[in-house]
Amino acid sequence: MLNSKTNLILCSKKILIVNRGEIAVRIIKACRELKIISAVLYTDADKNSLHVRAADQAYYIGKSPANESYLNISKIIETAKIINADAIHPGYGFLSENSKFIKEVESAGITFIGPSSKSVEMMGEKTSARRLMKENNVPIVPGTTNPIDTPEEALIIAEEIGYPIMIKASAGGGGKGMRKVYNKSELVSSFERAKNEALKSFGNFDVYIEKLIENPKHIEVQILGDKFGNYVHLFERECSVQRRHQKIIEEAPSSFVDEYTREKITNAAINAAKACNYYNAGTIEFLMDKNKNFYFLEMNTRLQVEHPVTEMITGIDLVKEQIRIAAGNKISISQDEIVIKGHAIECRIYAEDTINNFAPSTGIIKHHRLPSGPGIRVDRGIDLKSEVTVYYDPLLSKVISFGNNRNESIERMLRALGEYQIVGVVTNIELCRWILQRESFTSGNFDINFIENELFPLLPESWKSDVSENYENVISILAAILKSKEIELAPRKNCGSQSNKWSELQYE
């Protein structure tokens, strides 16, 4: 199929999107602009979902639990063949970084809109990825490049590296199988807990040790590569506002990264992509210390949740680029053509109860009014009467603001979140508004410990001695304080979405 406007050959006439929610809707929009038929999957819980109604075609894949549907590789491949799909787009999560799935897609003669299975395997196992990065002059955090088998070995290595250290699962991600260790007395128990959690979470008990970079920023670089060996970067994103190692607010570019550092970190990202012969869209994640030294963390071999902020500052549609690259085309832009214009911020809107230890919230969306106006984009997977269930990730939508500078982007985001109304489930909208108004955020003076650093000072002095490094303890105690002060959910004035008066906390 020829797209006359771009003069690019698009081999896909029908793409099967093996995902759900807002990312499925986002991919559908790109398919529509490229005049490609979009097909999606759905379960019992998703039969009336927005992505099902938005797609050209929808096919039942199985019962609601993901392992019976969105993770059922054989059923997905069978469906793709039956409907004559030319290509499969995995979105993010689910099977997007599963090398076995990619091999099955490739073996079925279907185009996978993403990297090769070999690249995913090379970057999926953390210790081998660290070795590869070290060999290709990409800075890594000092530590081991092989799994550690015994507590005795861990003790020796920890002494060599120097405390504090971090024990991490080799097959890990999302904070699972991770333990901070500040001294020798903590190491053996932390080592065993990390291995047990790694086995439970990933089916692999291998762990490794690296130096703990204290109070770092989480900076990532978006790259594109094609099958002809061409690579470009689309600058960096700031992703340091997190809870439980899951991002809440992202922005592009980072206000902390200067031009000199930007050139160094983007060159390192390109080197990382070249090292594994990567093609399609990918993200290289780094930790950056207060002196702007940066270290390779991992590579996300897929489209990122936060890709919209990069699209906003560069004007490049990353999903379209993914589709074109998978079809065998070269990257459609050169590095010289990619420039930063303005500033963008993304807030992830989750169905969760902030003051109840971020517990997931379920229910039917009874009222839904989107924000709008200059510089506002909303990528959503919900609509009026959508059902939010326990089966899937609680991400409802993403609000993205764009401004000529960071201050304008913040102001527009605050206005948009004030307009956004979701009734039927509890959301984190008010938490996002609270974060955006904190001085440490507006000044850019924050790191991955932002939530802990901002919440901890709110605790009474008499409580602080009982709080360990355990993040869940901090949140649970804060939740109790808020409830004891009768800071409860109530409608904002002239707005129907829930509020827990987070804005008042900045004055306490």
Image: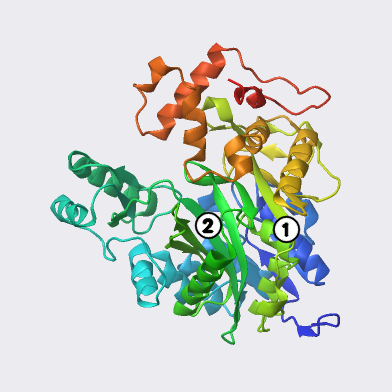
Horizontal side of 130 relative to 314 (left or right) equals left
Vertical arrangement, residue 10 with respect to residue 191, above or below = below
Residue at 66% over, 23% down: 501
Horizontal side of 264 relative to 19 (left or right) equals left
Amino acid residing under circle 2 = Ile
Q: Position of residue 245 (x, y in %)?
A: 47, 45
Q: Position of residue 169 (x, y in %)?
A: 34, 54
Q: Position of residue 175 (x, y in %)?
A: 42, 47
Q: For the N terminus, which image quadrant?
A: bottom right
The reply to whether residue 305 is visible in this rendering is yes
Mark 1 and mark 2 lie on one chain; the one further toward the N terminus is 1
Nearer to the camera, 375 or 475: 375
Vertical arrangement, residue 85 with respect to residue 154, above or below = below
Amino acid residing under circle 1 = Arg
Residue 26, numbered label: 1
Vertical arrangement, residue 305 with respect to residue 420, above or below = below
Q: Which residue, as the protein is rendered here, is positioned at the far left?
A: 152
- Mark 2 lies on a secondary structure that is strand
Nearest to the eye among marks 1 and 2: give it: 2
Q: What residue is disc 2 on?
A: 219
As measured in the structure, the alpha-carbon distance from the residue carrying label 1 to the one carrying label 2 is 24 Å
Vertical arrangement, residue 351 with respect to residue 21, above or below = above
Residue at 47% over, 34% down: 452
In terms of image quadrants, where is residue 190? top left
Q: Residues within 10 Å of mark 2 (few under 14, many from 20)?
A: many
Callout 1–callout 2 Cβ contact below 8 Å: no
Q: Which residue, as the protein is rendered here, is positioned at the far bottom?
A: 228
Q: How crowded is mark 1: few (under 14 residues within 10 Å), some or many (20 or more)?
A: some
Q: For the C terminus, which image quadrant?
A: top right
Residue 168, numbered label: none
Give the total number of marks visible in the rendering.
Answer: 2
Residue at 70% over, 65% down: 340
